[in-house]
Image (spheres, rainbow, N blue to C red):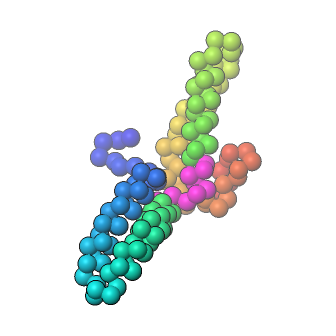
Amino acid sequence: MMQGEQQNEPVGIKTTTTASVGLGGSLVGICSLLPEQYKNIGLVIIPIISPVLSFFGVYLYNKLIESPEVAGYRAKLKRDLVNLRNLYNDDLVTDYAKEQAKHDYSATKLMLANLGRDQIVGKINPKRISTSDNSLNT
């Protein structure tokens, strides 16, 4: 990754939990502003509402960053990199196979590096990513 460039990664359970706790604390503070008759109801509902709101907030955030199809394709490319690296480091593989693995590893790294950019500029359509052969259909 180049200096000054930030990669947006989907957020996971740790962020969801932190958001839920923070939102719960904020809702408790807001609940103290309610009339006395509604405070108890609010305090009972907060532990239910806070995780649900956090889940939907994180879900929307992840949806805006990267579609599930592109995220799945990214995961497949990363698995391919691991398999190609293992193939290259295998002593029982021929030199030809190692050279091919080295070439494919470089090509896969380029595809992975350009995946987000290609989606933004319209080179790929996340709805048309083939899951059968791990290729991009444009």
x and y percentages locating residue 106 in the rendered image: 55, 32
Asked where in the image residue 87 lies, by quadrant, the reply is top right
Give the left or right position of residue 132, taking residue 45 as reference: right
Residue visible at 59% across and 41% down? Answer: 77
The span picked out in magenta is 64-73
Asked where in the image residue 22 lies, by quadrant, the reply is bottom left
Vertical arrangement, residue 108 with respect to residue 55, above or below: above
x and y percentages locating residue 61 in the rendered image: 44, 63
Vertical arrangement, residue 77 with respect to residue 14, above or below: above
Looking at the rendered image, the quarter that the C terminus falls into is bottom right
Most extreme residue toward the top is: 91
Asked where in the image residue 39 lies, by quadrant, the reply is bottom left
x and y percentages locating residue 55 in the rendered image: 47, 64
Looking at the rendered image, the quarter that the N terminus falls into is top left
Give the left or right position of residue 3, taking residue 67 as reference: left
Q: Main secondary structure of the magenta part?
A: helix
Q: Who is closer to the viewer here, 67 or 107?
A: 67
